[in-house]
Amino acid sequence: MEIDLKTPARPEDVLAFVGAILAGESNLNANLANIVAVLNQYLPRINWVGFYLLEAHSKDWVLGPFAGKPACTRISPSRGVVGKALQNRQALVVDDVREFPDHIACDPDSRAEVVVPVVVEDRVVAGLDVDSPYLKRFGPEDVTLLEAVCGQLADSWPYAHWY
Ligand code: SME
């Protein structure tokens, strides 16, 4: 894409970039992949960013587009940081994953994590997960940005993936 941002980027610029991605394409997989690429490039001090998507028949959260080391492919409802955040339908920040009893370790370097739900028509259809090798990496400003990204994504969520 032609947009280029400085790193770390201003939140409003990241949101403008995501808006341009969503305005230019309707394919969900392509858009998730490019949103991951934007966040991976412009969020400092992270080691993994990606989506987990609701699988309709199992209700599991299944790995979608991501950047980082290979990750667990399937998370049962309510399991791990991902399942807990999406069950509660709200962002969950974990300052130290080793203190989170049900944390699912994918990359041993990860020390902090944030998960934000994507809510479409009152249903959680996906989660955006970001990991960092730094303790207490994620604060309110990160949650605000990631919630805004997920809000933009929800607004353009395609009917074919609306469970
Ligand atoms: N740590 C997550 C699993 C996904 S990975 O971080 C990519 C969890 O506890 O749900």
Image (cartoon, rainbow, N blue to C red):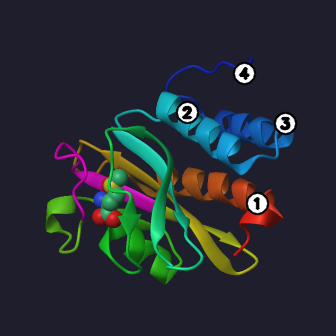
Say which residue label 1 marks. Answer: 157
> Where is residue 51 shown, x and y percent of the image?
51, 54
Say which residue label 2 marks. Answer: 37
Work out which residue is located at the far right of the displayed protein and give it. 23
Does dot 4 land on a helix, a strand or a loop?
A: loop
Q: Residue 24's mark? A: 3
Say which residue label 4 marks. Answer: 1
Badge 4 vs badge 2, beta-carbon distance below 8 Å: no
Q: Earlier in the sequence, mark 1 or mark 4?
A: 4
User: What's under tag 2, amino acid-wise?
Assistant: Ala
Q: Earlier in the sequence, mark 4 or mark 2?
A: 4
Indicate the quadrant where residue 15 lies.
top right
Does dot 3 land on a helix, a strand or a loop?
A: helix
Q: Residues within 10 Å of mark 1 (few under 14, many from 20)?
A: many
Q: Is residue 69 placed above or below 103 in the rendered structure?
A: above
- Asked if residue 107 can be seen in this view, the reply is yes
C-alpha gap between disc 4 and disc 2: 11 Å
Q: Residues within 10 Å of mark 4 (few under 14, many from 20)?
A: few
Badge 1 vs badge 4, beta-carbon distance below 8 Å: no
109 inside magenta stretch: yes
Which residue is at 26% across, 59% downward?
Answer: 95
Q: Which residues are magenta?
A: 104-115
Q: Is residue 131 placed above or below 80 in the rendered structure?
A: above
